[in-house]
Amino acid sequence: KQEVTQIPAALSVPEGENLVLNCSFTDSAIYNLQWFRQDPGKGLTSLLLIQSSQREQTSGRLNASLDKSSGRSTLYIAASQPGDSATYLCAVRPQYGNKLVFGAGTILRVKS
Amino acid sequence: NAGVTQTPKFQVLKTGQSMTLQCAQDMNHNSMYWYRQDPGMGLRLIYYSASEGTTDKGEVPNGYNVSRLNKREFSLRLESAAPSQTSVYFCASSERFGWGGYEQYFGPGTRLTVT
């Protein structure tokens, strides 16, 4: 059974810092991995989607990497801002089917 | 184009009451999903509908029923609510099911409290 773990559970950093969020998964037979952002009381917004054949994806200040063989992904946020404060969720899609398996998330707070 | 919409946004129920959560999407997607989100546990799949006319159980289906009313709408029913069903419920849709990695789009959620 696929399990997804995110470390740390919570992170507080001063504005301007670069930071890394970690995601690990137990079964490397995945089709893709997705990072989401969730603001308090809101739904999920997709940030980056990495296909299993890719190593990384970038969008603005965000960079996500994927090492499928070791079951790991990282989300790198450069020059963090208070507006980045949110919960970040990682989800993997198994090789077959379209059922996402989610991690519990990392709660990020960027202090001004 | 509203994407995925859910009603109601908030609901408080007493133990044993029933209710239906509504979800609709206007993206002409074939597949729809219901998840619940609990603190420290991420999102867990309750039921999904790969295409109109089909529904299947996900990871945590006990205590719930679903109806795929038409291509646009997918409802989740709690027949006899229990405090353990206090959660935030999200509906999602994707163009298709099956291998191909179709991205899922999420609604804003329904916050349900069962007392």
Image (cartoon, grey):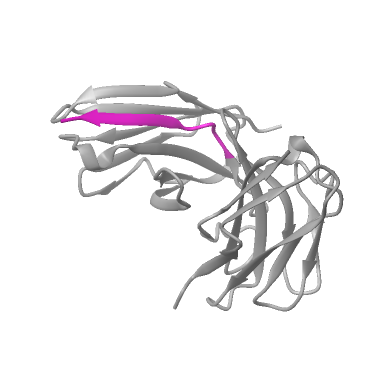
Q: Is residue B98 visible?
A: no
Name the residue nearer the viewer: A36 or A57: A36
Q: Which residues are magenta?
A: A102-112
Q: Is residue B89 visible?
A: yes
Residue under the point 40% across and 23% down: A10
Image coords of residue A12 (percent x, y): 29, 23
Determine if the magenta segment contains residue A40.
no
Residue under the point 30% across and 27% down: A20
Is residue B75 placed above or below A54 in the rendered structure?
below
Q: Is residue B16 left or right of residue B111?
A: right
Image coords of residue B91 (percent x, y): 61, 58
Quadrant holding the N terminus of chain A: top right
Q: Is residue A41 left or right of residue B17?
A: left
Which corner quadrant of the image does residue B9 belong to?
Answer: bottom right
Query: What predominant SS class does the magenta segment belong to?
Result: strand
Is residue A68 placed above or below B58 in the rendered structure?
above
Residue under the point 75% across and 74% down: B52
Quadrant holding the C terminus of chain A: top left
Name the residue nearer the viewer: A38 or B16: B16
Image coords of residue A58 (percent x, y): 27, 47
Image coords of residue A95 (percent x, y): 62, 47
Name the residue nearer the viewer: B87 or B61: B87
Q: Is residue B16 left or right of residue A81?
A: right
Residue under the point 73% across and 78% down: B70
How many tags in the picture?
0
